[in-house]
Amino acid sequence: MPGAWETSGGHARLFGGRFNITIKNPKHVQSGVKQLLLDGKETGKRTFDKFLGREVIGIPIESLKSGEDHEIVVTLG
């Protein structure tokens, strides 16, 4: 995401549901996830991705049920 952008977003249809995604960029950075919210609750487990060579945050897909709609808010920082 370009550092000049303060926000971006969109939606995706996955697993029979709709995922509304908002990306916030209050510090105008181009990478680095500070916080990940799923339906208003902080989520995601920080793990080291060997392919990317850095720490990443993921959404626990196993906790999602098919056909559900979800709100995802990613804050960069």
Image: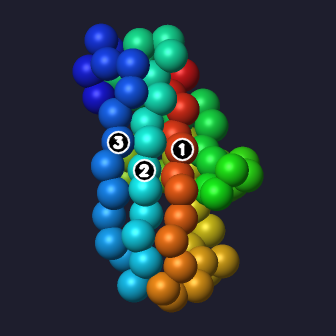
Which mark, by number, is residue 21?
Answer: 2
Q: SS class of the residue under badge 3?
A: strand
Report the residue at 32% width, 49% height from top. 10
Residue 75: quarter of image: top right
Dot 1 amino acid type: Val
Q: SS class of the residue under badge 2?
A: strand
Which mark, by number, is residue 54?
Answer: none
Dot 3 amino acid type: Gly
Q: Residue 15: percent from the left, percent from the top?
A: 41, 83
Instruction: Determine which residue is flagged by label 1.
Output: 73
Mark 2 vs 1: CB contact within 8 A? yes
Front residue of 59/50: it is 59
Crowd band around label 1 with a 10 angstrom C-alpha radius: few (<14), some (14–19), many (20+): many
Report the residue at 57% width, 49% height from top. 57
Q: Is residue 51 above or below residue 34?
A: below
Report the residue at 33% width, 57% height from top. 11
Front residue of 2/55: it is 2
Is 8 on the left or on the right of 33, as rendered? Answer: left
Question: Which quadrant holds the N terminus?
Answer: top left
**Chain-order first, disc 2 or disc 1:** 2
Q: Is residue 32 visible?
A: no
Alpha carbon separation for disc pair 2 and 3: 5 Å
Q: Residue 8: percent from the left, percent from the top?
A: 34, 34
**Chain-order first, disc 2 or disc 3:** 3
Residue furthest left in the image:
2
Crowd band around label 3 with a 10 angstrom C-alpha radius: few (<14), some (14–19), many (20+): few
Which mark, by number, is residue 9?
Answer: 3
Report the residue at 43% width, 50% height from top. 21
Residue 61: quarter of image: bottom right
Alpha carbon separation for disc pair 1 and 3: 9 Å
